[in-house]
Structure formats: C-alpha cells, structure tokens
Image: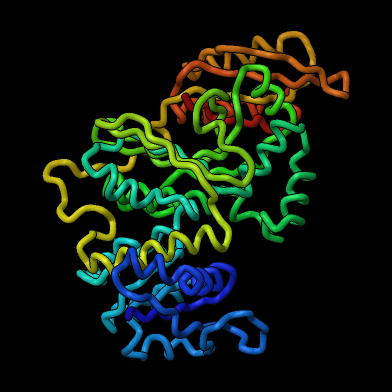
C-alpha cells in the first residue's frame, strides 16, 4: 500500500481524494499497488467538506508521518510551498505538485535538491493535458523546434467571445468573473503571467533553459478592442494569447503575448476555456495536444497520473527531462529586441492631409514596410483609426517606431501593436 498526504484540500485536492477512492481498482491495477489518501491539510477545519479522509490544519502532520510515502502539494504561492516541498524531500518523501508559480522560479533548485527523489508536476501546465509527459517521454528523441500554446482558459474564453460574438472586453471580463473563469483581480490571467509560468516549465523540458518570468517578454490582452477584432476577421486571423518557445541556431525565444494567427491553423481552433499546445519536433513534425486546462477533476487526473508513475517507476525519470547536459549545445535566451516577425499596428489619428505620409515615413525610417492597410472613420469625424500590418521586421525597430509615432502631434491615442505569428 502507498499512502498519500495532500497539503491543500480545495477544489483540486478534493478531486484527488475522490478519484483515488472512486477509481481505486483501476488505479491499483495500473500502479501495481493500492494508493490510499490518508491525510489532508486544510486552513479551516470548521468548513464542511464531503470527504472521507482525515483532515488537519497542521502541515507537519503530513511531513512528520513516516508512513506517508507521497506528498501532494496544492497550496499555491511560491516561497511557502517551496519550503514545504523541501521538507518533504528531506524526509525522503516523493512529491507531486500543481504549483506552476513555484516551478517557474525554483524548478532547477528543486531538481538539484531532490536528487533521486521523484517530483511529479504534470498538473502544473495545461490542467488535464499530459503535455509534460509528451515532451519528456514521447518526444524525447526529437530536437524541439517550437512550442506554441494556448494555456490560459480565462483569456481564451474572453478572446473567443470577442472574436465570434463581438463582445466588448469589459463586458466579457465581467461575464468571465461571474462564471468563475476569472478572479476578482484578473490581472494574473489577463496580464499573461499565468501562461508565462507554464511556458517556462515547458521550455526547461524542451531546451534545458533556465529562465525566470522577469527574463522574458510578457504582455496581456487588456488593450485588445473591437478594431483589432475587425482587422483579424477581415484578413483571416484569430487573436489568441499565445505562449511561444522557438529555437533558432543556439538561441531560444520565449514570449507570451496576444498574437494574430491564421484562423485555419490547428492552434487557432482551440476555443472557449479549452487549452491547446502545438509542438514541432525535428523527427515527428507537428503534434497537437488539446483538452481542459483547469478544473478540479481534470487537474486531479494529472496529479494522480504522477502518483501512479512514481509508484510504478520510482526515481527513474529525470524531473526536467535531461539526465546529462548535452555537450557543446548550451542554448541561450534570445533578447526580445531580436525577435523577427510581422506586426499589426492600430493608430488613432487626427484625420487630415499628410498624416498617412508621415506615418509611412516614420515606419520607413525604422526599416519597416507596410503590408496591408485599412482606414476606419471614428465616431468623431475629425479622427480616424488606421490599421496596418507590416512585413517581417525586428522587435527593436517596431518598438522604436511606436515610440516615435506616439510623440507626433496628430496622434490621438497611444498606438497599439499586436504580433503576427505564422
């Protein structure tokens, strides 16, 4: 028998307990041993919970219990759970965590600290989608050329409604909050930070690169409006909050931001609260992974898959996918200024003669050429909204051009830029 202690018995923790008990026969058949949840840690013992498991509000009750083999950490946060996980490892207990924020900052530290003690973290990225196992095991013979993911259900739900129904950003944000998809303070989701944490975890497995959230380009969806939706629909794009990891020579670019993508691409068809990840390997080509990115049962499914894997295989699988560092192939993080792609720009201007020529000259001064252009009249007839797409250029150039445009006297609002990913 393998005994499991769960620290944090909320939505996911409760699902872990219920699934382990409800599906104990098939889990035992697949793991080779019976897996039993024996103790759960909660903040408030007075809260009513329909769970058949002993509860405590003292984390040490799990950490100090020598009969508990595996600790499931579902606390949330960064530094406090890090210390809990270290204490569990020091007691020679295997750990399973769904904590993407902790891993975004401390995954390499934990790998070194754990040594041969297994740490499972499938549930930290894309909920019920087994993307970590796919990268670490199924695609282990491949050099990973790129990863593109939709890994925040809140943003994807909002953008899908905006694209398909024309709902305004503020309206759909309120709806997402009412439905429980968005928090009262939604900035972590709509600002791109949640998706960035997940991207960093995948990048470590794919490329062995140690980057922190502060090291990469992160932008959210808060500036997207009806004009951007119009342009996307007009030119055959979808707008998604996209996580991107892309290898070029000895560098990897890591970025999270809204992107215009071809509406016929597989990743563009991931709608609503669902998640999707496209991975391109040099041997296999493109593979696509789709499923629920959150929710108690879906995330618990990934937690339990790690528990079963630990019971089956012990410490045979390396945490971040590499048992040895590849000689002469240490990859570096590409600077954001060196990103080379196409761009969309929205500019609200005073509608007068010569404005378009001045904009073209500023873009040309920064080696940016215009690919397509639409002018839309504003409700205020003295102003117009100009929508451009560009040919490929460097990020540094587009940023400098936007800075110069923003200083012009004919600009009515700060220009907005969205990258086009093909």
**Measured from the top left, where is residue 39 in percent x and y?**
46, 85
Q: Looking at the rendering, which quadrant does residue 286 occupy? A: top left
Residue 151 to residue 409: above or below: below
Using the rendered image of the protein, determine whether residue 77 is visible from the camera's viewpoint.
Answer: no
- Which residue does the image show at 55% across and 12% down from the upper left? 371
Furthest residue in direction left, as rendered? 327
Residue 31: x and y in percent read: 32, 67
Q: Is residue 206 left or right of residue 177?
A: left
Tell which of 201 and 44 is nearer to you: 44
Q: Give the side of residue 45 with respect to residue 199, left or right.
A: right
Query: Camera-side residue: 410 or 84?
Result: 84
**Could you say which quadrant of the image residue 386 lies in?**
top right
Q: Position of residue 168 (x, y in %)?
A: 78, 38
Tell me, yes or no, if residue 216 can be seen here.
Answer: yes
- Counting from the top left corner in percent of width and height, residue 383 is at 81, 21
Q: Residue furthest right?
A: 380
The way the protein has been coloured in the rendering is rainbow
């Amino acid at each position: 028998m393998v005994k499991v202690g769960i620290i944090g018995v909320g939505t996911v923790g409760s699902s872990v307990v219920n699934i382990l008990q409800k599906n104990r026969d098939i889990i035992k058949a697949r793991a080779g041993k019976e897996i039993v949840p024996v103790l759960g840690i909660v903040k408030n013992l007075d809260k009513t919970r329909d769970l058949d498991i002993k509860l405590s509000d003292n984390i040490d009750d799990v950490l100090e219990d020598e009969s508990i083999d595996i600790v499931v950490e579902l606390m949330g946060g960064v530094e406090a759970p890090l210390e809990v996980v270290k204490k569990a490892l020091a007691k020679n207990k295997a750990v399973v965590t769904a904590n993407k924020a902790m891993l975004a900052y401390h995954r390499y530290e934990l790998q070194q600290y754990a040594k041969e003690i297994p740490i499972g973290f499938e549930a930290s990225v894309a909920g019920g989608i087994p993307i970590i196992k796919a990268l670490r095991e199924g695609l282990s013979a491949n050099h990973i050329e790129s990863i593109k993911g939709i890994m925040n259900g809140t943003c994807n739900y909002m953008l899908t409604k905006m694209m398909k129904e024309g709902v305004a950003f503020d309206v759909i944000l309120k709806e997402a909050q009412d439905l429980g998809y968005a928090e009262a303070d939604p900035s972590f989701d709509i600002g791109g930070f949640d998706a960035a944490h997940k991207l960093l975890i995948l990048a470590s497995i794919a490329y062995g690169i140690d980057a922190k959230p502060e090291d990469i380009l992160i932008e959210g969806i808060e500036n997207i409006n009806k004009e951007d939706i119009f342009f996307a629909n007009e030119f055959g794009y979808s707008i998604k909050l996209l996580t991107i990891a892309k290898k070029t020579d000895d560098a990897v670019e890591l970025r999270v931001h809204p992107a215009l993508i071809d509406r016929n691409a597989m990743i563009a068809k991931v709608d609503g609260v669902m998640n999707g990840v496209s991975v391109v390997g040099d041997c296999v080509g493109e593979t696509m992974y789709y499923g629920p990115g959150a929710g108690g049962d879906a995330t618990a499914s990934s937690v339990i898959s790690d528990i079963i894997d630990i019971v089956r295989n012990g410490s045979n699988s390396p945490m971040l996918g590499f048992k040895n560092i590849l000689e002469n192939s240490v990859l570096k993080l590409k600077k954001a200024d060196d990103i080379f792609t196409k761009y969309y720009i929205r500019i609200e201007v005073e509608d007068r003669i010569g404005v378009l020529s001045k904009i073209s000259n500023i873009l040309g001064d920064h080696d940016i050429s215009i690919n397509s252009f639409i002018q839309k009249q504003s409700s205020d007839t003295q102003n117009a909204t100009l929508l451009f797409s560009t040919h490929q250029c460097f990020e540094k150039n587009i940023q400098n051009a936007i800075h110069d445009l923003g200083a012009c006297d004919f600009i009515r609002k700060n220009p907005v830029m969205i990258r086009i990913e093909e």
